[in-house]
Amino acid sequence: MLEWLVYILVLVGVFFLFIAAIGVVRMPDLYNRMHATSKAGTLGVGLILVAVAVFYQELSVAARALSTLAFIVLTAPVAAHALGRAAYLSGVKPCEDTYIDELAGHYQANHKLESVDTEATQRRI
Amino acid sequence: MSWLLVLPLLVPLTTGILCLVLPGRTAQRVLGLAGALGLLAAGLALLAQVQRQGIQAVQIGNWPAPFGITFVADHLSALMVLISGVVAVAVALFALAENDQAREGLGYYALGHLLLFGVNGAFLTGDLFNLYVWFEVLLLASFVLMILGGSKAQLAGGVKYFAVSLLSSILFLVAVGLLYGATGALNMADLALRVERVHPGLLTALSMLFLVAFGLKAAVFPFFFWLPASYPAPPAMISALFAGLLTKVGVYALIRVFTLIFTHDTGFTHSLILWVAGFTLLLGALMALAQGELRRLLSFQLVSHIGYMLMGLGILTPLALAGSVFYALNHMIVIAALFLLAGLLQRLQGTTVLVRMGGLYGPYPWLAVLFLLPGLSLAGLPPFSGFWAKYTLVAAGLQAGQYGIVAVALLVGLLTLLSMGLVFAEVFWKKAPEGARAAPGGLGGRVLPVGLLAVLTLAIGLWAEPLLSLSQAAARELLEPAGYIQAVLGVSR
Amino acid sequence: MEILLAFLVGGLAAVGVYLMLRPHLIQFLIGFLVLGNAANLLIFTAGRLGSQFPPLVQPSGAVLEPYANPLPQALILTAIVIGFALAAFGIVLFYRAQQALGTLNAETILEAPDVSPAPSPVDELPTEGVRR
Amino acid sequence: MRAFVYNVVLTIFWMAVTEAFTLENFLVGFVISFLILLLARPLFDAPSRRYFTLAWKLPRFVLLMLWEIVLSSLRVAQAVLSPRMPIQPGIIAYPLEVKSDLEITLLANLITLTPGTLSLDVSSDRKVLYVHGMFVDDAQKVIESTRESLEKAVLEVTR
Amino acid sequence: MNTLILKTTSRFLFTLLLLLSVFLLLRGHNEPGGGFIGALVAVGAYALFALAHGVSAARKLLPLPPLRLVGWGLLVALLSALPALLLGRPLMTGQWFSLLGVKLGTPILFDIGVYLTVFGALLSAIFGLEEAAHHPSEDA
Amino acid sequence: MSFLEVMLLALMLTLPFALYRLVKGPTLPDRVVGLDLITTLSVALAALYALVSGQTAFLDVAIALALFAFLATLGLARYIEYRGHKGD
Amino acid sequence: MVVAIIVAFVGALTAPWLHRWLGHAAGWVLALLPLGLAFYFASLLPEVVGGQTLRHSLAWVPSLGVNFSFYLDGLSLLFALLITGIGTFIVIYSGGYLKGHPDLGRFYLVILLFMASMLGLVLADNIVTLFVMWELTSLTSYLLIGFHHSEFRSRRAATQALLVTAGGGLALLAGLILLALMGGSLEISELLGQGQLLREHPLYLPALILVLLGAFTKSAQFPFHFWLPNAMEAPTPVSAYLHSATMVKAGVYLLARLQPALGGSEVWSSTLMLFGLATLLTGATLTFRHTDLKRLLAYSTVAALGALVFLIGLVPLTDYYAAMGFATFLLAHSLYKGGLFMAAGAVDHEAGTRDITQLGGLFRVMPLTGVAVVLAGLSLAGLPPVLGFIGKEVLYVAALQAAPAWVVGLAVLGFAVGAMLALLLVVPFFRGQPPQKVHEGPPSLWLGPLVLAGLGLLLGLFPGLYNPLADAVASAVKGKTVAYHLKLWPGFNLALLLSLLTVLLGVGFYFLYPRLQAWMAQEPIPGPENAYVALLRGLMRLAAGVERLLQSGSLRAYLAWIFAGLVGLVGLALFRGGALFWPAGASSPRLEQVLLLALMFLGAIGALRLRSHLAMVVVLGLVGAGVALVFLLQNAPDLSITQFLVETLTAILIALVLLQIRSIGPVPRGRWLDKGLALGLGGVVTLLMLGMLAQPFEPHLSQFFAQKSLPEGFGRNIVNVILVDFRGLDTFGEITVVGLAGLGVWALLKRRRREEQP
Ligand code: NA
Ligand code: NA
């Protein structure tokens, strides 16, 4: 019974990893690709790690598997943030379909970021 | 007495570490010299031990061979260690006078002794992979020493030295890996027994990898280019240390593996080594003639004379091998002396470019003597140590009917003599050119180590028997590996 | 598997060598790293493959067979570390060389900026007009 | 914080008396001593008492997060797998209510992990979080839903 | 990189990485890990901190300058090799004893030496380069 | 081939996608995303292999990778921030 | 005898100190050293003349069979007496000639060292000892010829002499070693008895050629004669000593010494006669070109050396005339030539010129020197009643006995030039006016010439004084006992007629000389020296060319050489040894791993076309990760972790550095050479790996580790136990490497920070 749970977890995990991979290929620009890895990727890995925890039914193994998951959850968004920000700063333009870009023009020469007049923004939308 | 065998390792290591840990300038200087003297003493003790009791082996970590790492001292190893101690002492003395606070602040003493740590490890280890590690130790230490101070020339030379060394490193690694894969062994004595089961053609091909990897270290044709590109760059004492020790490690490794492991097809491998030796000798000597700068000239001489050491290995008779060993030992002293001397001249005249030098014979006659002793020794003239080295090789070559290489060896002797003669004429005899720099200050304690080495080459020349008979003992052991294997593995072939 | 690895190692070695022969020294360094990977795979293969278990002794004291040959692993670990140290040093060396020499072109880093005439046994070296 | 230290000290004492220094025993001891401390809650001052609320807010928070991740992944999957790629990407400025470093960071990271949004950067004056959205058909809706679910959750845990 | 998110996260991840590093070091003799791996992770911790907060801030989190650590690491390794010599055994022969049921020995000490050396050396490289690469706009 | 082994193979089949992005780019950050994906996949592979082989030791690979690999992304991001996405 | 030689060397070493201490008187005191040695050797005369040979030997390098051994018979004794005897006067003469020269102390040192070496050379029994002394004479003469070192001409002459003589010495070394190998001994005295064996040995001819090369270069035989006149750049005492009586005679000595062992073959006699004659004629002919006293004497020396070599070639062909002629002519020449050189120096010293056309009327102002020149001139001309006459007489007798008539005729022509030279030398003393302020030099300058020339007269008048020693010399050269009665007046014979002819021709030449000289000095005559110069210029050009070709300065070229060497050597060995394998019994490929390997390869190839280095690093990250995954799937968790970590840190480091430097490479359009080398190397690596995998593998090491890891290493992670225990020393080295790298990086960067500070 537990075995089946493991199989399902793994299967779904692999599925999401596939989604992440395909997303990285198919998505139109960098920022959208990062969505694929940071979400589907995290989920996919997470499911497989949970499968490991379930499979061994040992506290020490589960602890390691779940802390791995925790680490990924901790680090993946930071990495995505750093990369997205750097890419934007270096001039990687969002794809043409991009609906709105409120960040445009707000980075100063020394990479400091201005805040925007939120009222004005809300009006624009 | 197993500690005696690891002493040449522990002394420089401890010195190097203490230099890293103790920041005081005085402490470092004292350690720098004490460590070198200690190494010399350790080398003497080890040689005495080997003399008395034959080949020594110790199983590091007490794991029996071939499973752990074995350290072995036969005559060859012990002699190499001893002479490296001599060079170390000379360079340490020079360094005491030469070093400024800046270089000491950059860790000169620690680096120097860690270099010696690697060199002696390489001389003493009985394990091929372990040898790789020692090579890397001495390599990295030498990289850092080479760029210490960071002048443009040093960086330009350092880049080339580094690049080629990387290549040799990886080559050596691959060679060890392949040999391990073909035999399952890493211990050199174990390898000597197991290579018999390897397909001979494959074994020859593997031996070629070692030839290239060690040939790069030894700077033989066609792998020598890095040496003249880099050795002239660092301060003289560092060049001297390198010239004295580093290429000899390559030569040592070649001698070791091509007497212990790859002896199945000497008709091919060792003939090839002879060709390599011949080209190295000739091209090195020729290119030395084209040099107008002393240290670059010496670098080409260094390359050329590596050929002599390979010549003995290629001929592979007891006398020839003894010649190789003796040549290597002699050359360590002589070339270190010459590079140090270049340092003295640099200090006196502010340059080592021959055309801008001159006029030293009158005011510095003893300096002329200090040049002539090692210079003529390098050319193989009596009554200096270099003569016996060349004599032995020539005699061995004639005995073995290898007339071609003997002719090359003699010709190169003449070219070397010409080269040294030209240097002598330019630096000492020629009038100082207009505006030549007047000697500032003086040379201070820098002269002492050069003098010691120069006297040593003369002393060995006059009384060659001890070192020659030791070299012969080394050669006998090399040609009869059973003793080595017995000492390491405790079994006979 | 071993045979495939032999071909992969050869292929990686070719790529590494090709990069090492490029004129830019950073490419040389990258080539070295590729070659290092190839070398590590080579050593790994040299210890033979086909294992099913890692070389860990079970708490019971037994080693599950066939275990992966631990020796090449130890050798590779050492080699990786050394290679890494070399690479780290090299990266900084190249950086400094670029700063000091203004180039990292393997063909233009000169080794004898001071080209001085060699003395000859039959013709005198010019002593006039020698810049010091 | 002090409560947590007490908890750990008690756990160690538990392990000592049961003479078993294992991970399992640590967990058992931790839970038992936590329950005991829960009884003794009035003995602690107000800031320390936050430890006990956190103890049950945190798991809820984590579960919420997991759920959000699953949802967002499904959304991505849908987008990735559909042939026409129905996305409407955009970068929007999200006016922050949270103030402290920890809160901002937590929120930003959560936004990245949750449906269709990805934090790009925080303005230097910490007033605005710039977010890349995959499905920005209505920016205001994105902002509001985020404020309702994520920012609230963060504030619950941190304050 | 001057970002709030990274700065905040890095404080937490720094300790986490250090913890992982010690974990990998100590269990290395029995499970995957060991001095080298542990040291790399520790270097990662400091590299992260330096990236987020600047090198000088990271240096303050070190008890000794990195190069001094190299010296001490090598010294520890050397000291682990010597007891055997004093007892008349070959260099580096492992000397073991039990403390509270835990098997301790010179090889473990040696691994700690490895840890310290690698940590110090790589950190000196990372810090040095970070300082060299320091960009004016990164001033926090 | 057991189910898990099939899954292992399936997981491996995601790598070509990453390779595509890696080689294709077009910008440096895109390649970094590719590398990031490879890291994530590697964590998954390590975890899955811990299942397939029955050896929990491989979980340690996953742990180390999970906590460490993002440093590369950070380092590269820093480069991109100051030197641009074209790589120079 | 050994002691004598050691005393000679040690005595020489004291010279600079004695000079500093004693000042001008040093020459006289230092002369006591050769004088004492001369007396010592003279005291051995009775034994040697009595037919005894003396041998003294010290073990020197016993492991090579090299002894510091010495052998005294008539030949070596004669030489020893010449060396020490003439040496005595030379030292005295030097004190006068170089009075006040700042380098005089050094000069004493070197010339006495030379004397000691020369003494060692002629006494040596062991061929190694002989060679050592031989090269020492070359070396010391180098320093002596270059005494006026600030002149380029002096330096060039010194280098030339060194190159020619030391170069010949190297050939000699090879020849001597061959002889020793053939004869089975390093002792000359033992080789002498093995002439038969040596001559029949297949290596006889090469050995002979090598020995002759050594002897001919040293003794300035054609075509190596040119260095000797050039060596006249040396101060006169040097010429008087080295270039008349001693060093240049070393080659002659050696030939005479080895005559019993090597002589007796057709090739020996014909070669020696041919070259001897050629040298004689060359020396004679070139005499006409010069007016410089020392040059004239130098060419005359060349001629005399030719004559001596010619005589040695004759020795096996005649019963004893040639040997006796050798003994006599050798001594005569040494005496008159030494005297003449010193006299020429004295004239130069006092008159300020050595040009014979500028000199005149010297006898009035320098009578003692004049007497010496007249006596020596008689000897040079071969006129009675001096020893030179006897020497030439016996020579003619020997030549007539064994040489073809045309050879004898040519020899007469050569000697006639000697007679002419004698006239040229003597006449300025009597004709014309002396230059102003010229007067006789101090005793140190005229004592030597006078004594040497006088000795020539004495022995000419009383040849019986020399006869016993001459017999001993001739016996040594001949290889069997010779007893010949030397007389001043041999009676009328063909030889006497030839002598007369010689003198007449000489007088004739004397009158032709002014015109001939003017004509011959006009155009440079191409000779072997041109070849020497061309050879060396060519050598230097070749050297520069080779350097340009090989040491081009391009790292790429160096690497290409290395790769080419590697592929070539390994490829050759593989194909030659037939080591091409397709291993059987490898583990079966697993699908997911095959996929992984393929991806790694594609990634690596894909990275090659990128321009950005960092992009390349990122793409190659796939290879790094792939390797880690291979390790993972092959059950090596430690490796996998390490690989991942290291790849990550490497990427960080590279990114950090590339932040600072330009990192776009040129668009990689590779050279065919690079591609070929890359493919070649890849192929070779694959072949090697396949070969390796085909070998049976023994896992004995790993089995041991697996067994002992827990029970004796107390660790369950075998890899870690190997690292910290089984092979802990590797790891020790490894961390040293890492530490050094850290130190290096720090040193590199620290320097930079300092530079940045103002
Ligand atoms: Na190496
Ligand atoms: Na290691």
Image: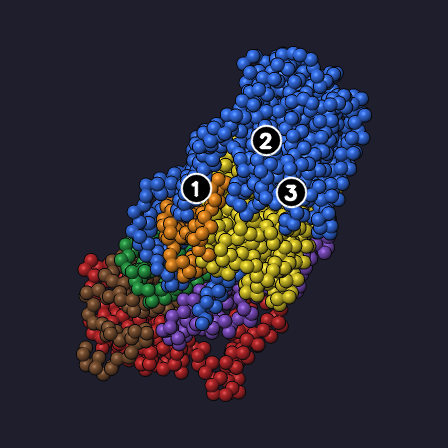
Chain colours: A brown, B yellow, C orange, D red, E purple, F green, G blue
Element on which disc 1 rests: helix
Question: Pointer 1 indicates a residue of which chain?
Answer: G
Q: Which residue is mark 3?
A: G439
Which of the two labelled residues, at mark 1 and mark 3, occupies the earlier sequence position? 3
Which quadrant holds residue G663? bottom left
The answer to the question of whether label 2 and label 3 lie on touching residues, with beta carbons closer than 8 A, is: no
Q: Amino acid at mark 1?
A: Ala
CB at disc 3 and ligand 1 closer than 8 Å:
no
Which of the pair E111/G168 is nearer the observer?
G168
**Residue G490, picture quadrant:** top right
Q: Which residue is mark 1?
A: G544
- C-alpha span from label 1 to label 3: 54 Å
| Apparent side of residue D44 relative to residue F73 in the rendered image (left or right) | right
Mark 3 secondary-structure assignment: loop
Q: Which residue is mark 2?
A: G427
Chain at numbered mark 2: G
Would you identify the image quadrant in which residue D67 lies? bottom left
- For label 1, being within 8 Å of ligand 1 is answered no
Numbered disc total: 3
Task: Report crowding for label 3: few under 14, some 14 to 19, many 20 or more residues within 10 A (C-alpha).
Answer: some
- Where in the figure is residue B303, as x and y percent of width and height? 52, 42
The x, y position of residue D104, in whole percent, is: 36, 77
Identify residue type, mark 2.
Val
Give whichever of discs 2 and 1 has the lower sequence position: 2
Residue G513 visible from this viewpoint: yes
B152 with respect to D6 (left or right): left
Residues at marks 1 and 3 touching, judged by CB atoms closer than 8 Å: no
From what the image shows, is residue A81 above or below residue G296?
below
Task: Residue G162: tell me if it is visible.
Answer: no
* Front residue of G574 and G753: G753
Which of pointers 2 and 1 indicates the residue nearer the eye? 2
